[in-house]
Image (tube, coloured by chain):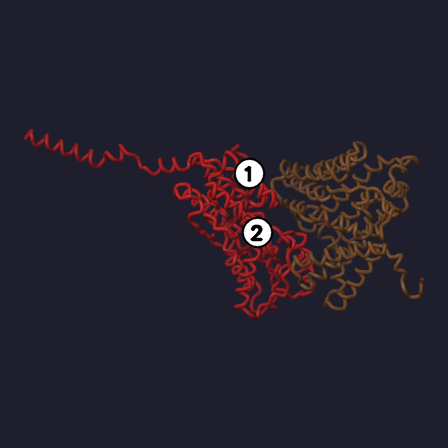
Amino acid sequence: MNTIGWPNFRSLNQEGIVFAIAVVLFVAAAIGLPGFIDPNNLVAIVRSVSVLGILALGMAVVIIGRGIDLSAVAIMAMSVAWYLQLLNSGTPDGLAFAYVLAGVLAIGLLNGFLVAYADVPAIFVTLATGSFVFGYVRSQLITQDAVPVPQGHWVELLGGLRFLDIPIEVFVFAGLAFLFFLFLRYTKWGRYIYFAGDNPAAARNIGIPVRPMLVLRYVLSALVALIAGLLTAASLHSINTRVVNSTLLYDIVLVAVIGGIGLSGGRGGVRNVLVGAALIGILLNAMTIIDIPLLTQNLIKAAILLGAIIVDGIINPRDEQTAQQGDI
Amino acid sequence: MKFIRTLMAAATALAVTAFVAPTFAADDPGPAAYAQALKGKRVMLVPLAMGFDLAQGWAHYLKTEVEAWGGVFETRDPNWVVDAGAQAITDAISSDTRPDVLIIHAPDLNSYSKLMKKAQAAGTYVILVDNPANFPADAFIGSDWDRLGQLEAEAAIKGCGPNSSKKIGLVQGDQANSSSLYQYAGIMKVLDKNPDFKVVAKPDSNWDATASRNVTTTMLQQNPDICSIIDFWDGDATGASAAIRDAKLDGKVFLVTTGGGEKAADCDKLQDGTYGAVVMTDLARQSGDMNAIIKFLLQSGQPAGTSHTYIYTLEKATTKADLKPDSCWDLKALQAQAAAAK
């Protein structure tokens, strides 16, 4: 069947399809849109998806282990809002950060504990803890939606950091992506995540510490959310907790899933996140340059995603062998 | 003589009783009627969310006044969720303690129309604040968004100057909220009269600061010679200002926005040059208008839904040059005051 020069369509998976769409869009935009190919614009594209991508890395690790973390955005916004509120009311920086770090770890541990040891489905646990974090912090710890960064604070300075004229978020995203890649690919616990995600019962039978590892994943995801929140505040000089109500959470899941990380667990990696983030970044940037209204943008975004899923369904049909229990 | 003296005394007594007595015997009927009409009446504010400056300012001024005349003031916090707001209004209408006046900050033109009609049918006066809706409320109090857009456009044109690129970028809110739609219409009216000024891009931020930053970055990337940007709300204009800062165009791009005139959100940012001009709502006066119309409606005796009044708040574009100590109100000070009162 294989002829020289033609890719093997049978071997194309969702990641490949999305990557192809991203490349086509990129080439089309580079030809058709003035200024798109400008290095500064390319940096802006990467930057615009950096925070999204960082959150998606945390989400990816959880999803590969057959879980999901719906509390990520709440942790991201509320931890940083609380931190800034503490600073604004005069708490010493070190102490404030220690409080917040402890809070974030506690929520990560709680998520992990409830999923791993209380056997509550991750989707319910993290939905509940996300609401709890938002409600508690919003009502008890901060006074309003938007909390500004105190003038001259390191978070503000962080936002102004540039290397080679490239914003710091891009390096943090790249650095974290590399660390997650090393973790998933080359560490024992990283490899175990795939086993646990693919078949938790079998993983447990061969002696993998499935439950402690589950807890670790949720703690990782919470810490990643904190980093994403700090970067957001660094760039905007404030954090607005309204973001918890936005579609950001779905966008995170989307970036992971569209890149080809199966919600059923055990499949995918950092590369999938990068491909998903690239598609979203190129798409949003091109549509903004063309000046397409938001409603139409959402329609186009949804249509492309739906198209990718349909093509994947045709090329890689599901059957009794490929489908598995828990496949959403 | 004695008779005359008696007569004079009698006349004096008569005169005294006739002219002075009324002020002693019968009080000014006003306060009693006022108290009778208002005492124990319930006023409820349902804003888009309680967590932002406008709502917190309104709540402060309304609470002070309503409680002063013996009424009950309550708020509900839908936290930007339209359904939660609808639920709050539904519960309020059907509860035993149905509010006599419902002040609603509508999320869009249509969502609450049916509920507001229900409220009026139940006998509750409905006052719309800030965002207009397709519903004949008893009163609308807030900005004339069209006029507000015109003021923004005029400020942008002035900020650009005659020798500039005359390129203006807009960061709209969304395509559903009346404040965004009317603001856009107002801006375009002014720009139509100044045809040498061009809108080079008009993306939406969906009221989100990160989105505002991303679209502004792209906009400045495509048109580095933009002389002014109008962002439709100070809540997300921090994003546009971050993009300008990142592009090292501070001082070159005149950022115009609109807001509730809160000190940290508006005046401080005018002072440090983040914003070039802010069309600010005089929140204390707007709240005063609400208080006045509440008092009027409760005394009027007219059934809810009888009259439809529009009270537009006076808007003004403020720049650093005409910033005064009292240009803004201070949310922190109000919160400290409320905490001290507890």
Please tell me which residue lies in front, A191 or B244: A191
Pointer 2 residue = B108
Q: Residues within 10 Å of mark 2 (few under 14, many from 20)?
A: some
Residue A281: mark in rendering: none
Tell me the distance, in whole angstroms, between the alpha carbons under discs 2 and 1.
20 Å
Figure quadrant of the N terminus of chain A: bottom right
Name which of mark 2 and mark 1 comes first in the sequence. 1
Question: Looking at the picture, how far across and down is residue A164, in whole percent?
Answer: 78, 58
Few, some or many C-alpha atoms within 10 Å of disc 1 (few <14, some 14-19, many ≥20)?
Answer: few
Chain A color in figure = brown
Q: Secondary structure at mark 1?
A: helix
User: Which residue: 58% across, 44% down?
Assistant: B49
Determine whether the residue tagged by mark 2 lies in a helix, strand or loop: loop
Could one spot residue B273 in this view of the protein?
A: no
Chain letter tied to red:
B
Percent of width and height locating residue A238? 65, 47
Q: Quadrant of residue B192?
A: bottom right
Residue B21 point in image, percent of width and height: 23, 33
- x, y percentage for residue B332? 56, 42
Is B65 drawn above or below residue A161 in the view shown?
A: above
Q: Amino acid at mark 2?
A: Asp
Question: Disc 1 marks which residue?
Answer: B91
Instruction: Identify the amino acid type marked 1.
Output: Asp
> Disc 1 is attached to a residue of which chain?
B
User: Which residue: 67% across, 55% down?
Assistant: B213
Specify the farthest residue to the top.
Answer: B2
Q: Which mark is nearer the camera, 2 or 1?
A: 1
Q: Is residue B238 visible?
A: yes
The residue depicted at 60 percent of the width and 65 percent of the height is: B199
